[in-house]
Structure formats: C-alpha cells, structure tokens
C-alpha cells in the first residue's frame, strides 16, 4: 500500500515488476491517497506526504501480532518477515503451549513455558542458537 | 471477496471503516489529539479499512476484514518505483 493511485500501480506492475516476477505481483497493490489508512496505522509521514516502510503481521482473528517500521532509504528483510510468520503460526497451532526463543527458525528447538522451565532455560537453550 | 470496481477517470480512494476515534472538544484540543496519534499495539485488533487496488489486471476494492481467517501481511512503502 502506498499513496500512489491504482493507475500508477498498474504502470509499475505492467512495465517493471512483471519483468522481475513472472506474471506480475500476485497480491493486491492498494492505494491510500492522502494517507488516511497510513495515518490510522501510525506510519504516514505528514511532512513528506508519503508512507514509511511499515509492515504489519495480522493473524486470522484480525489481531496485530507484530510490526516493523523503517524510514524510506532502508529496505526490509523478507526472510525475517517469513521467519516471524512461521513462528507465529507455530505458536498459534500449539495453542500457546510452545514459544519460539531468540534466533528460532524452523528446525530449531521451541520452549514450553511453565513452572518447570523457570531457571532452566540455560539447560536447553544455548546462546549460539540466537544466531544462524 | 473483493468486488471489481468500474473505473473511468476518477481516482478512487478508501479509508478506515468502523467507529472513529472521538474528537470532541475545541479546535485546539482536537489539534493536540491529532499530534498525539498513538502507534498500533501488538495483541490488539488491526484497524479495518477499505482501499482501491490493482490486482492481476483488474481494479478492485479491498477490505481488510474480508481476510479474517487468513494471515495477512500489510506492507506500506513510500512510493511506486522504489524497493520494498
């Protein structure tokens, strides 16, 4: 979503993005003229008249599980977004019985929070697990 | 889910839907409220909205609440022809 019109979205997709991604962009490219939606989400920069790089992860109940906002010059890490999505999906499927510690990615250990884990995290989780 | 919109030369816009935040009070108070816009909170409902969109060759209208039951990644960016 950006402040550009749907007409500009079409030109960008048809003339440039479709050359990067076969078939063009598969998801809706939304237009937020005036930044009305961006303002509600707290990422509209009134001074510059554009939206900053805000990214919101919303679960199937419509609840915001996480967000990240960057100023325009720095791009986002799509892998990190996917990792967070996988972690939130795992937690949701476990109905909250499992948690994904720092550095978790698919295949790494999860934790089962509860009285038995208090003071015992060091036994199962090592600091090098925080890194790839 | 998302209905196609019949566009001519008009530039369509969307916006938040549902209840709006109370902005009663004097003009001065309203201004203060406006400057005090708070950030979205994790663990709370994402504000619903509608927005016109371009999707696979069509102009459509997207409503966030139509996606209940699915995971949604909502991405804002400064402008077309920039990176993500």
Image: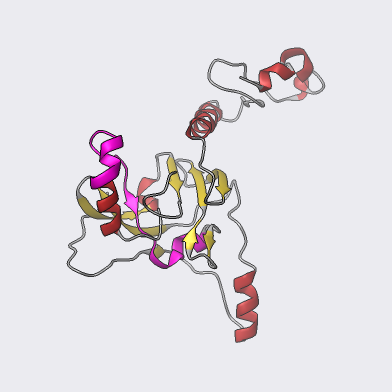
State the extent of the magenta-drawn residues as a range: A14-40
Between B17 and A31, the one nearer to me in the picture: A31
Where is residue B40, by image quadrant?
A: bottom right
Picture coordinates of residue B22 (x, y %)? 56, 74
Asked if residue B20 lies left or right of residue B59, the reply is right
- Residue depicted at 77% across the width and 13% down the height: A123
Instruction: Give the residue displayed 50% in from the left and 46% down from the top.
Output: A55
**Quadrant location of residue B70?**
top left
Q: Which residue occupies the foreground of this view, A39 or B47?
A: A39
Q: Position of residue B76 (x, y in %)?
A: 46, 51
Question: Residue B12 falls in which quadrant of the image?
Answer: bottom left
* Camera-side residue of B12 and B4: B12
In the rendered image, the quadrant that contains the C terminus of chain A is: top right
Q: How is the image coloured?
A: secondary structure
Image coords of residue B53 (percent x, y): 30, 54
Query: Residue drawn at (61%, 23%), measured in percent from left and top?
Result: A104
Magenta residue check for A34: yes
Q: Is residue B62 above or below residue A131?
A: below
What x and y, as percent, mark residue A44?
51, 61
Question: Would residue A130 be found to the left or right of residue A13 on screen?
Answer: right
Residue B67: say if magenta: no
Total numbered circles: 0
Q: Taking A113 as reference, is B71 left or right? A: left
């Amino acid at each position: 979503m950006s402040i550009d019109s749907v007409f500009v979205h079409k030109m960008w997709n048809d003339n440039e993005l479709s050359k990067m991604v076969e078939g063009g962009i598969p998801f809706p490219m939304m237009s937020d003229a005036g930044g009305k939606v961006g303002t509600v989400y707290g990422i509209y920069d009134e001074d510059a008249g554009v939206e900053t790089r805000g990214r919101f992860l919303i679960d199937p109940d419509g609840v915001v599980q996480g967000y990240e906002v960057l100023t325009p010059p720095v791009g986002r890490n799509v892998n990190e977004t996917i990792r967070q999505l996988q972690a939130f999906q795992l937690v949701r499927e476990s109905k909250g019985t499992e948690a994904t510690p720092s550095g978790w990615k698919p295949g790494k250990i999860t934790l089962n929070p509860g009285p038995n884990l208090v003071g015992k995290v060091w036994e199962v989780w090592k600091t090098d697990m925080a890194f790839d | 889910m998302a209905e196609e919109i019949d566009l001519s030369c008009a530039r369509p816009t969307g916006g938040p839907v549902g209840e709006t935040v109370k902005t009663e009070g004097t003009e001065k108070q309203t201004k203060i409220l406006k400057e005090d816009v708070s950030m979205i909170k994790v663990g709370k409902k994402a504000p619903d909205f509608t927005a016109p969109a371009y999707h696979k060759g069509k102009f459509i209208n997207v409503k966030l609440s139509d996606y209940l039951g699915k995971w949604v990644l909502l991405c804002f960016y400064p402008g077309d022809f920039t990176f993500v």
